[in-house]
Amino acid sequence: MSRGGGGCCPSMDLMRSEAMQLVQVIIPAESAHLAVSYLGDLGLLQFKDLNADKSPFQRTYASQIKRCGEMARKLRFFREQMSKAAISTSTQFSGTSLEIDDLEVKLGELEVELTEVNANNDKLQRTYNELVEYNIVLQKAGEFFYSAQRSATEQQREMSADQSGDSSLESPLLQQEMVTDPSKQVKLGSLSGLVPKEKAMAFERILFRATRGNMFLRQEPVDETVTDPLSGEKFYYSEVQLFFLSFECSYYIDRSLKNAFVIFYSGERAKSKIVKICDAFGANRYPFPEDLGKQLQTIQEVSGKISELKATIEIGLAHRDSILKNISSEFEQWNTLVKKEKAIYHTLNMLSLDVTTKCLVAEGWSPVFATSQIQDALQRATVDSKSQVGSIFQVLNTQESPPTFFQTNKFTSAFQEIVDAYGIAKYQEANPGVFTIVTFPFLFAIMFGDWGHGICLLLATLYLIIREKKLASQKLDDIMDMMFGGRYVILMMSLFSIYTGLIYNEFFSVPFELFGKSAYACRDPSCGDATTEGLIKVRPAYSFGVDPVWHGSRSELPFLNSLKMKLSILIGVAQMNLGIVMSYFNAKFFRNAINVWYQFIPQLIFLNSLFGYLSLLIIIKWCTGSKADLYHVMIYMFLSPTDDLGENELFPGQKLVQLVLLLLALVSVPWMLIPKPFFLKKQHEQRHQGQQYTMLQATDESVTELEEHQDDPHHHEEFEFSEVFVHQLIHTIEFVLGAVSNTASYLRLWALSLAHSELSTVFYEKVLVLSWGYNNIFILIIGAVIFLFATIGVLLVMETLSAFLHALRLHWVEFQNKFYEGDGYKFVPFAFASIIEEED
């Protein structure tokens, strides 16, 4: 309800949204930044964009936002570097604080320093990787260089001895060179390096074809981890991983090896081709001295450089880590400061700049109770900025619909989100979230009723609630985050499931005599059926819930079906009546007498003339133990209302009551349809005439107010009687048909409860009990494991989700469509806390 004045605290009333006001704030330019900052800390003012016609680049503070964006980029770079170095940020803020200009300079210096350190480390690492590969090539190539060279020399001698006559075009080039004079023979050249093993076969084939066989290739796998100097890709070799990680790792290792190779060739043309092929296959080439003395000297030099570089790299990495650790201690504080500054300038861009007075004009929505708090924040900003002129705060009159704002806590917020997911409440209309706190988990529990499964849900929820502080500070995945956000909803669902499970007397489908002995006993020891013929009542009625004697009997399913079906109808009619009653309170609150007389009353009469009467018959039948067929009663109430009821009569005068109720139901339909459009038309004409009479005696002030009112878009809407009548016709038909379909929709409570109970029984009897009957420990263990996974996967996950969605449907459609318009928009104040949380 609307309240005057500026209180100091909210009402915490969830039934109606907080009273809102449109305010205007005129802030001097020198205190604008600080004022917006204090308002962001307060988080109770939603700014309107007064520069919506300007692009982001045309606004006053576009350059400042660009600066903040650049600082945010540098902070993201630091975060990536800390993540690579496995350095976590500190959540504790240091006492020292920086101005944004000083922070910008510091971030720039740190970025330059860190970039230089990374560049030097990368250069050293690349050189180190090259030397490691070079060392491997020297070792591997040295093992078979001379043996390959001797083999080639022996082959040359044999070919020289056997060759006679002129060379043909088809003979290999190497063979032609061998048959010439020894003084004219071309000296063999060599190339050595490393090539990825996965490319080794193709590498060899291309070399053979390009040189027409005039080359000699030797290659051997490398048995240690190497990093490619150019791409930075690591090539692993690990037999231990191959043994433990099986085929998948085997495939990975096979692709990731490198082969050391040496190629012997003759001629510069062949060398040119081989070099191009090596580059194409990503083979790194390294020089290999032919002289044995130079080889040993080169190996020593390379080993020495590797040791020196390794020490240098470790020093560089330690220096980089020290820089990152210094950054990590203040990273969160810097990040928060940059986010706040960016949000402040983004908000300042929404304000209108008055160049003549050097002031910024802001407009926005705030709760009425926050008036004094906003004024205090503006006053503090004036004092702290040492401004000579104070800010001006004033409330504006407007015809615009205010945003909707509900004060919620960690318990009620999740239930309010369930309602908001359907639609945000219109300003100050009745909030279904108040009832959802109880009705939503209760309807869920009717479908899920098993106190064993309820205890499992309760334990899982208590884990989330007990560890909520720790979990709230962590980044959770989507599913876990959703469960954590709705932990109190699940808590209520589990508690109500235990309650309804006790009523159904089901613990993993097994009944217990928790509230005393059964009221019935067998006539003789041989009977085992819960019927009136097989059992006799020996004790008072079972004190709470379903008597355990019904479970396992032949009459169990008909009895429980009848019970749950009738309970579903009673609960559905009660909740729909609650929705219609809430429409009355809405109409009363908004002073809409037409909706009271021509919507609330006929809807209440229609629903209760039919389904309210059915609910009454169910209760009477339970109380009297009558055998009347309620299907017959309801059907013939329409088909033959004047016929005698016979054995289906539940009380004297029932026939007359049914005739009256049927008449009332028929009368309520035109009552809903016809009068309302005519009254709306008359109301519109009276309002229009009243405006014309007002114009005759208007003062300058009233003319100004009228012009402002005429600027309202709703003022120019013309009244179309045909459209209003068609809309009312649709609404009437929807309610009449919905009364039937919505009542039938509540039967899902019975259907899902039956499905849950039957599934639970099947898993218990056909898995757990059956495996127990084999008297074999291994079969029992297998049965218990299957029962456990079936219970968790099907009953505690799938059935929970199914019952949740059906309860959601019953609230969104069957309940809320009776009174809830849900066409409002949410109050989104400028608040640093929510901005930082969303970006994180």
Image (cartoon, rainbow, N blue to C red):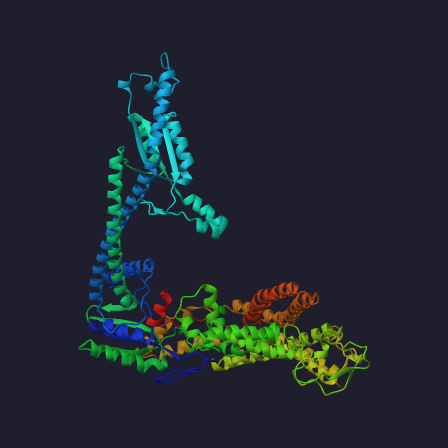
Q: Report the side of 154 relative to 320 (left or right).
A: right
Judge whether 128 appears above or below 380 on screen.
above
Residue 630 picture quarter: bottom right
Q: Report the side of 45 relative to 596 (left or right).
A: left
The quarter in which the C terminus is drawn is bottom left
Residue lying at 36% horizontally and 72% vertically, measured from the top left: 829
Residue 331, how many percent across, how many down?
28, 66
Residue 84 picture quarter: bottom left
> In front: 692, or 240?
240
Judge whether 460 appears above or below 183 on screen.
below
> In front: 556, or 604?
556
Residue 640, how many percent across, how many down?
76, 74
Residue 591, how many percent across, how many down?
48, 81
Please indicate, yes or no, whether residue 137 appears anywhere in the rendered image. Answer: yes
Judge whether 248 appears above or below 137 on screen.
below
Residue lying at 41% horizontally and 69% vertically, measured from the top left: 716
The quarter in which the N terminus is drawn is bottom left
Residue 792 picture quarter: bottom right
> In front: 444, or 662?
444
Q: Report the side of 527 relative to 493 (left or right).
A: right
Please indicate, yes or no, whether residue 598 appears anywhere in the rendered image. Answer: no
> In front: 591, or 604?
604
Residue 522, how many percent across, how many down?
79, 81
